[in-house]
Image: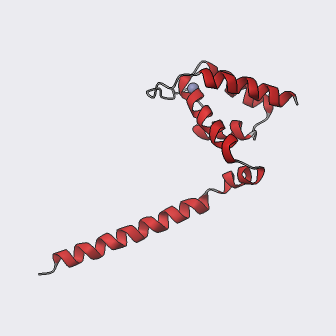
């Protein structure tokens, strides 16, 4: 498929990219979530091509895209891509554990306050 070649070529370019660690997205940069959609192939090809072109001259975005692409290549199935849009459940878990944590802290604080 032509699409595969397209992505393979881009992978090669990403591999050549050096991670400097101090690059930041500018005001013209797309959101990080856009790169996930590019990596997952959720965007129309024309839109993806536009974003990929931006990433070629923008280190910050290239790094985001590389991260997204690597994570997806490593372990993503189509089912998981669908779940990418269902992240709220994971967020709920996180909030629940946060609530448990703060409850524990409150108990400790009360005990310490006793004579
Ligand atoms: Zn950028």
**Nearest the eye: 94 or 15:** 15
Give me the residue at 51% from left, 29% from top: 25
Asked if residue 23 is positioned above or below residue 32 in the image, the reply reads above
From the viewer's perspective, is residue 106 above or below residue 39? below
The percent coordinates of residue 88 (x first, y second) are 60, 59
Query: Residue 28: x percent and y percent?
Result: 57, 26
The N terminus - image quarter: top right
Q: Quadrant of residue 113?
A: bottom left
Give left or right: position of 103 versus 5.
left
Image coords of residue 108 (percent x, y): 26, 74
Which residue is at the far left? 115
At 23% from the left and 72% from the top, the residue drawn is: 109
Q: Position of residue 40 (x, y in %)?
A: 72, 41
Q: Is residue 55 visible?
A: no
Which corner quadrant of the image does residue 55 belong to? top right
Residue appearing at x 86%, y 27% in the figure: 2
């Amino acid at each position: 498929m032509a699409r595969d070649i397209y992505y393979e070529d881009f992978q090669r370019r990403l591999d050549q990219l050096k991670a400097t660690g101090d690059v930041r997205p500018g005001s013209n940069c797309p959101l990080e979530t856009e790169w996930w959609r590019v990596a997952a192939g959720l965007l129309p090809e024309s839109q993806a091509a536009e974003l990929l072109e931006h990433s070629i001259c923008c280190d910050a975005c290239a790094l985001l895209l590389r991260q997204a692409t690597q994570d997806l290549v490593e372990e993503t199935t189509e089912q998981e891509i669908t779940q990418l849009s269902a992240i709220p459940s994971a967020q709920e878990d996180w909030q629940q554990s946060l609530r448990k944590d703060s409850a524990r802290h409150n108990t400790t604080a009360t005990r310490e306050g006793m004579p």
